Image (cartoon, rainbow, N blue to C red):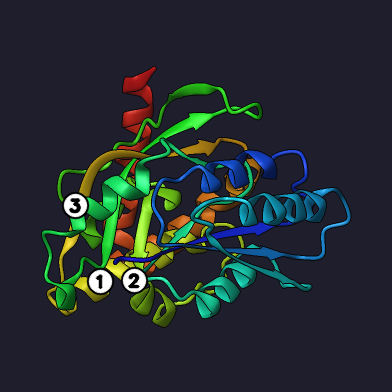
């Protein structure tokens, strides 16, 4: 059985964490490990987690819950801790306020993987994302949609696949830990490096063609939009060169005008 590790990184997330915990507990799939990495929250976050653990023990098929509670050096440092601890075949980052799109999401994804040889499982499983507000209500489909075929070059067009809908094979994801020199867009760099690894090793990338995630639109990257964009430009230049990066940003400007 394919096993999934869901990693939830929290810090003072008491207002939104319950929705995420309930979404994980509602997954119909049995092979789930849930790692919660908390940076010593001072609000109700840990109380919510404790209630979640208690409820989970009453379930017929309880998920394995791991709590790591200690200071960290920011979001991506906490995510690296989850990578080190993960025991599943795939790791999924689902942070406070984010949810799976349906209770059957992991069951549906696992069924698709049955077509692959166990020695050549896809490095990445990806899909679409819907945006939700603070109350979990649908806002809209994400404007950037996942391409039919995802490659490392796809990200020249921006973050075409939301980080939460990018399920990475844990062995490869762990070897490509988040670069802590980036404060707001290390996930963008991480996704590109994982895709490049898949291409070097001639391993498959799988398009689930499913809406995988309901994403809370007011995340850290959204709140620090300008600084995130500057980081992404430097990451893009590192991977693709400044010429292609500048050309891509001209297209971004044109695209934004067309959409208005």
For the residues bearing labels 1 and 2, Cβ distance under 8 angstroms:
yes
Rendered residue at 15%/65% (across/down): 204
The answer to whether the residue labelled 3 contacts the one labelled 2, judged by CB atoms less than 8 Å apart, is: no
- The answer to whether 87 is drawn above or below residue 67 in the figure is below
Could you tell me residue 60's position as x and y percent? 51, 52
Between residue 247 and residue 9, name the one nearer to us: 9
Cα distance, mark 3 to mark 2? 24 Å
- The earlier-in-sequence mark between 3 and 1 is 3
Q: Which mark is residue 196?
A: 1
Mark 3 against mark 2, which lies toward the viewer? 3
* Mark 1, secondary structure of its residue: helix
- Residue 100 in the figure: left or right of residue 153: right
Displayed quadrant of residue 256: top left
CA gap between label 3 and label 1 equals 23 Å
Q: In the orientation shown, which residue stands out farthest toward the top?
A: 260
Q: Secondary structure at mark 2?
A: helix
Question: Is there any visible trace of residue 167 in the rendered image?
Answer: yes
Looking at marks 3 and 2 on the same chain, the residue that comes earlier in the sequence is marked by 3
Neighbour class for label 2 at 10 Å: few (<14), some, many (≥20)? some
Residue nearest the viewer, comparing 57 with 257: 57
Q: For residue 57, which numbered disc appears in the image?
A: none
Residue 224 drawn above or below residue 138: below
**Residue at screen point 20% across, 49% down:** 207
Location of residue 189 in the rendering, given as x and y in whole percent from the top left corner? 42, 65
Which residue position is annotated with label 3?
A: 112
Q: Which mark is on residue 193?
A: 2
* Residue closest to the eye, 87 or 185: 87
């Amino acid at each position: 059985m394919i096993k999934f590790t869901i990693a939830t990184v929290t810090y003072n997330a008491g207002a939104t964490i319950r929705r995420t915990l309930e979404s994980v507990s509602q997954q119909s799939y049995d092979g789930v490990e849930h790692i919660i990495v908390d940076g010593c929250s001072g609000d109700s976050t840990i109380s919510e987690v404790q209630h979640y653990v208690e409820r989970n023990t009453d379930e017929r098929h309880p998920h394995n819950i791991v709590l790591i509670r200690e200071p960290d050096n920011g979001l991506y440092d906490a995510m690296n801790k989850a990578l080190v601890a993960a025991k599943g075949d795939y790791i999924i980052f689902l942070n406070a306020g984010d949810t799976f799109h349906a209770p059957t999401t992991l069951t549906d994804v696992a069924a698709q993987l049955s077509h692959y040889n166990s020695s050549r499982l896809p490095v990445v499983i990806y899909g679409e994302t819907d945006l939700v507000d603070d109350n979990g209500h649908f806002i809209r489909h994400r404007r950037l949609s996942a391409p039919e075929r995802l490659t490392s070059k796809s990200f020249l067009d921006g973050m075409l696949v939301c980080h939460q809908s990018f399920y990475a094979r844990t062995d490869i994801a762990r070897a490509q830990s988040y670069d802590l020199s980036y404060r707001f867009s290390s996930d963008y760099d991480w996704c590109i490096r994982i895709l490049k690894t898949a291409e070097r090793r001639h391993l498959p990338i799988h398009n689930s063609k499913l809406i995988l995630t309901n994403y809370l639109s007011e995340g850290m990257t959204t709140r620090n939009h300008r600084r995130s964009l500057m980081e992404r430009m430097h990451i893009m230049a590192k991977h693709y060169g400044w010429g292609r990066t500048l050309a891509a940003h001209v297209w971004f400007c044109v695209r934004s005008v067309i959409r208005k």
